[in-house]
Image: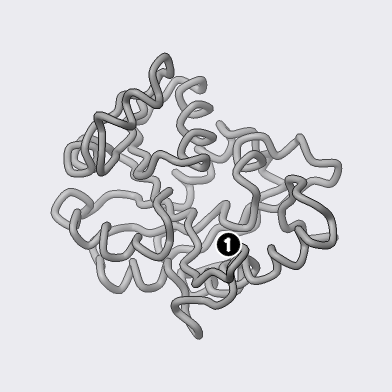
Amino acid sequence: MTTITVLGSGNVARALAGTLCDAGHQVVVGSRDPRTTAADWAGSAPRVTGLHEAAASAEVVINATPGAVSLDLLTGLAGHLAGKVLVDVANATAADSAGFASALLYPGGSLAEEIQRALPDVRVVKTLNTLHDSVMADPAALAVPPTAFLSGNDAAAKEVVGGLLADLGWPAGWIVDLGDVRSARVPEAFVLMVGSLVRALGPVPFGMAIAR
């Protein structure tokens, strides 16, 4: 059992926190407004608390906050995150009028790289950001096996994240380690295709898959 904090309280946080609880982990949800979030999450297993308390209590922290605010939020928690594994599942983008990603906030780089640069003592691993939230913890729901990518500088941290992915239903053969954190920039750019894919396919769950 691992103590895991999920920062954020939207659909991504719900998908990951619930399944990780079911897998036997102790899960804490960190929110800027814990009272409102606790009411919204009433009846669910994870405990809801403020961001600082949540980050301090965890062995592993999952960044499920909106990517546009993630860097500022996480740097504000630096003292609680040092030495910990930080799983970054967010995409930092500007949005068009329909709410779809229209541009990367860190062109030529990635949110994961910016987090690692700002928090050098944190072991950042990027994953799951190329998938609809409903698929992150239920990859077998898709007709074609999707791919979960790993990007990060710390091999031991990636092993920890690989174990959590297994708890979320990911077979080892569906997980691809791309290398160090710089490799996160390519899968992060996948989000720029999402608007076009939704217009072409309709609002159905999907994710990136590597055919081989």
Name the residue at 48% across, 46% down: 161
Name the residue at 81% across, 52% down: 202
Judge from the rendering whether residue 148 lies leftward or rightward of residue 144; answer left or right.
left
Which residue type does callout 1 highlight?
A: Gly
Q: Position of residue 40 (x, y in %)?
A: 39, 26
Judge from the rendering whether residue 103 lies leftward or rightward of residue 115; answer left or right.
right
Name the residue at 47% across, 52% down: 158
Callout 1: SS: loop
Judge from the rendering whether residue 155 lies leftward or rightward of residue 196; answer left or right.
left
Whether residue 172 is situated above or below residue 167 in the rendered picture: below
Residue bearing mark 1: 99
Q: Quadrant of residue 135?
A: top right
Q: Quadrant of residue 149?
A: bottom right
Q: Nearer the viewer, residue 153 or 97?
A: 97
**Colour scheme of the rendered structure:** one colour
Q: Position of residue 124 (x, y in %)?
A: 38, 59
